[in-house]
Amino acid sequence: MSSFKGRFSYSVDNKGRIALPAKLRKNVSPEANETFIVTRGFEQCLFVYPQDEWNKLEEAIRHLSPSNPQHRFFVRTLLQWSTDCQLDSQARISIPHDLLKFAGIENEVQILGVLERIEIWNPNIYEEYMNNQPATYETVAEAVLKPQE
């Protein structure tokens, strides 16, 4: 089970390659076999799943109903953007141009560890996202971490 955490600033080379931070790589399970799936995330970021974590997500998706229009839309959207990639000898992954464009990524990225996945953001979009939340971190933490009754 992956447990990614932390925030890292990195650059993107002209071929769309991004190095994965060593602190995140050390938390990739051997079952992932240095294979990752990159896909469209939420709030204009990219999600990067190690293969073993992607397999868990895929299993959950298989339980969605093909007769439900929302389920179909979600599955189609997620999978049409998904691509497999391997770490190269310099611990980089190649991000397809259409995904970089979706996320507004050009030269620099913010890489976040978010438990079972890694998120890749344009630093300006991430800063804007964080600065435009309707509630404070403390207010959200109170609501989210409230014990179940």
Image (cartoon, grey):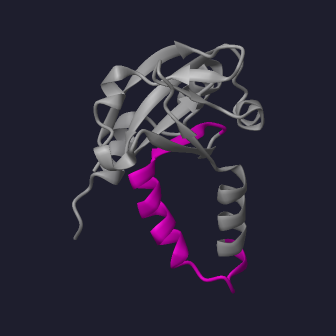
Residue name at image x 51 percent, y 26 percent: 88
Q: How many marks?
A: 0
Does residue 148 lie above or below 124 as drawn? below
| Res 45 → quadrant | top right
Q: On the picture, is 118 further left or further right than 125?
A: left
Residue 79, visible in the rendered structure = yes
Residue name at image x 65 percent, y 57 percent: 78
Q: On the picture, is 59 further left or further right than 133?
A: left
Q: Residue lying furthest front in this view?
A: 89
User: Residue 59, how many percent across, how many down?
Assistant: 46, 70
| Res 146 → quadrant | bottom left
Q: Within the magenta stretch, is there residue 20?
A: no
User: Residue 58, how many percent across, how many down?
Assistant: 50, 65
Q: Residue lying furthest bottom in this view?
A: 67
Residue 41, visible in the rendered structure = no
User: Residue 6, how many percent across, how many down?
Assistant: 35, 26
User: Residue 27, how many percent across, how many down?
Assistant: 29, 36
Task: Say which of 48 and 52 sits in front.
Answer: 52
Quadrant (top left, top right, bottom left, bottom right) of the C terminus = bottom left
Q: Which residues are magenta?
A: 44-70
Task: Say which of 109 and 141 sits in front.
Answer: 109
Residue name at image x 69 percent, y 33 percent: 103
Does residue 92 lie above or below 141 as drawn? above
Residue name at image x 53 percent, y 75 percent: 62
Q: Within the magenta stretch, is there residue 57?
A: yes
